[in-house]
Amino acid sequence: MALAYSVVGAADADTAFVTRVKAALENACSAISSESAGTANHVQRLSLVGRVLSSPVSYAQQFALAIAAVAPVLNATSLAAALDTDIQTGVNSVWDMFALRNI
């Protein structure tokens, strides 16, 4: 059963979930910092790395809302039940959306 919108909409206030998102963001920052300069949207992606690293909790809260709303996290029975790999997949899937909108 998919997460209720009330859970998705409050994901940024779920401290445990935000902490897990923060760890996934840090993992993504490391990977993106070493990706090829020829990667699509690399400049924007790398710029977001700098912003995330300068304010990791704030970005974790913002990403938490987006990640809770996308599969596979959305399909979990609760935010706590989402696997770390699900959260990482969520971060990776919305990274360019944040980067290209200069969020």
Image (cartoon, rainbow, N blue to C red):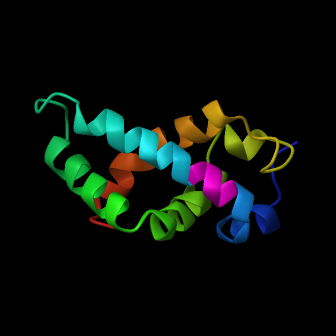
In the picture, the quarter occupied by the C terminus is bottom left
In the rendered structure, the answer to whether residue 52 lies left or right of residue 1 reads left
Q: Looking at the image, which residue is at 83% across and 59% down? A: 4
Check if residue 60 falls in the magenta segment: no
- Image quadrant of residue 11? bottom right
Is any atom of residue 5 visible in this view?
yes
What range of the chain is rendered magenta? 17-21
Q: Looking at the image, which residue is at 44% across and 39% down? A: 27
| Main SS of residues in magenta | helix
Q: Residue 25: image x %, image y %?
A: 46, 48
Q: Is residue 37 above or below residue 16?
A: above
Q: Looking at the image, which residue is at 63% across and 59% down? A: 18
In the picture, the quarter occupied by the N terminus is top right
Is any atom of residue 69 visible in this view?
no
Q: Is residue 97 above or below residue 58?
A: above
Q: Residue 35: image x %, image y %?
A: 22, 30
- Image quadrant of residue 34? top left
In the rendered structure, the answer to whether residue 64 lies left or right of residue 82 reads left
